[in-house]
Image: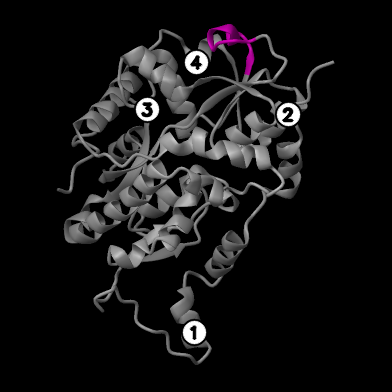
């Protein structure tokens, strides 16, 4: 009899992922059409106090995407609050309700948001299509994990050739990153595997049901699966490093802006990048923050094994450096994407720059 793969995601595909009280409150605020607390107080006849920093200076507003529950970046919000990073960096983060990553990126392109996360391939595609997006600071290293059931005889990605692999849709960063990391090792993702692309929860449910031989899961879902006994045979970043010799993990995404907005608001953008970089550095220096904020990841309290694994498994996916080594990482991704047909051509201008 096969070892159980769990039923967390089978259940969540029907009921939805666990949502913390903080996430529920933020989602409720978004239902007011982005008015925010201040506008809500005014509507109720109460004057909202002006937002100021420690020196009494007005905070600079910046429209950012609402944090999506159960993602690797969802922990940034509570850490920002816990350490008072908004006031410290002189910012007022105005969160838009938005949707997933695709919706957030569309909202940036249309000006509904001032900033959102983009990777080098997504930014290149946007700019080829006539936009002018530029990435100016780090947010996440890639956190895709190749997982197999506990009783599987698979020990490497090479062993999975011809097998059924679950992954996010072909338009997703997860899919593209998996293809890049295999390509630099001489492996053709689309030809050498039976690929089953789909939305994360649906694919995770298929995997738990036994319909897939392996899955490329992202955090924190990957950690929840490992806590149930599933085995990790590789990470996308490890494969990238093996094939390229790059000491850095595979860069996933960073803080992106429309260049026209950036040119008129460079100081605000620099403050936002500093805020996010400090939040990432706090995690790297004290990974126990990840376990302490398990609710932000959408992990129920009873999943103690998964919570205990968060510090060791996620501490290294929050970069704070923004330097030539990261730029080389992005340039290499673009070159490989051209070679394997993920990109038709490069953008006319670099898709990244430094604000300093």
Image quadrant in which you'd find residue 332: top left
Which residue is pictured at 46% across the width and 23% down the height?
Answer: 236
x, y percentage for residue 310? 54, 39
Between the C-alphas of marks 4 and 1, the distance is 53 Å
Mark nearer the N terminus (3 vs 2): 2
Residue identified by numbered label 3: 250
* Highlighted range, magenta: 154-164
Label 2 sits on residue:
208
Q: Earlier in the sequence, mark 2 or mark 1?
A: 1
Please tell me which residue lies in front, 219 or 135.
219
Helix, strand or loop status at disc 3: loop
Q: CA distance from mark 2 to mark 4?
A: 22 Å
Residue 91 appearing in the image: no
User: Is residue 331 in view from this perspective?
Assistant: yes
Q: Residues within 10 Å of mark 2 (few under 14, many from 20)?
A: many
Mark closest to the chain's N terminus, 4 or 3:
4
**Residue visible at 43% across and 89% down?**
47
- In this figure, what is the number of numbered marks? 4
Q: How much space separates mark 2 and mark 1, taking CA atoms? A: 46 Å
Q: Which residue is the site of mark 4?
A: 189
Outermost residue toward the bottom? 45
Q: Say few, some or many: other residues with alpha carbon within 10 Å of mark 4 (under 14 / 14 to 19 / 20 or more).
A: some
Above or below for 353 versus 37 = above
Q: In terms of sequence position, does the residue under pointer 1 or pointer 3 come before the other?
A: 1
Horizontal side of 60 relative to 199 (left or right) equals left
Going from the N terminus, do you reach mark 4 or mark 1 first?
A: 1
Disc sitting over residue 41 in the figure: 1
């Amino acid at each position: 009899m096969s070892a159980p793969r769990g039923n967390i995601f089978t259940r969540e595909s029907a009921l939805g992922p666990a949502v913390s009280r903080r996430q529920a409150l933020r989602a409720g605020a978004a239902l007011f059409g982005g008015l925010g607390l201040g506008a809500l107080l005014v509507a109720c006849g109460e004057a909202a106090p002006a937002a100021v920093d420690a020196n009494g200076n007005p905070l600079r507003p910046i429209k950012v995407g609402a944090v999506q529950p159960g993602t690797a970046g969802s922990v940034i919000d509570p850490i920002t609050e816990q350490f008072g990073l908004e006031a410290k960096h002189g910012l007022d983060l105005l969160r838009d309700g938005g949707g997933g990553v695709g919706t957030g990126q569309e909202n940036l392109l249309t000006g509904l948001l001032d900033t959102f996360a983009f990777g080098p391939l997504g930014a290149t595609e946007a700019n080829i299509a006539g936009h002018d997006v530029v990435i100016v600071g780090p947010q996440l290293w890639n956190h895709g994990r190749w997982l197999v059931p506990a009783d599987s005889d698979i020990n490497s990605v090479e062993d999975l050739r011809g097998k059924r692999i679950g992954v996010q849709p072909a338009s997703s960063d997860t899919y593209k990153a998996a293809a890049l990391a295999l390509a630099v090792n001489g492996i053709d993702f689309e030809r050498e595997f039976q690929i089953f692309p789909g939305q994360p929860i649906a694919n995770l449910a298929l995997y738990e049901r036994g319909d897939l031989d392996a899955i490329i899961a992202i955090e924190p879902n990957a950690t929840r699966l490992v806590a149930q006994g599933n085995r990790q045979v590789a990470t996308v970043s490890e494969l990238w490093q093996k094939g390229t010799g790059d000491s850095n993990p595979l860069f996933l995404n960073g803080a992106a802006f429309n260049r026209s907005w950036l040119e008129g608001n460079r100081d605000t953008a620099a403050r936002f990048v500093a805020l996010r970089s400090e939040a990432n550095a706090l995690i790297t220096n004290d990974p126990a923050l990840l376990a302490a904020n398990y609710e932000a990841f959408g992990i129920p309290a009873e999943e103690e094994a998964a919570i205990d694994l968060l510090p060791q498994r996620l501490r290294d996916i929050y970069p704070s450096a923004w330097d030539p080594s990261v730029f080389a990482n992005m340039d290499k991704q673009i070159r490989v994407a051209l070679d394997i047909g993920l990109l038709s051509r490069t953008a006319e201008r670099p898709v990244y720059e430094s604000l300093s």
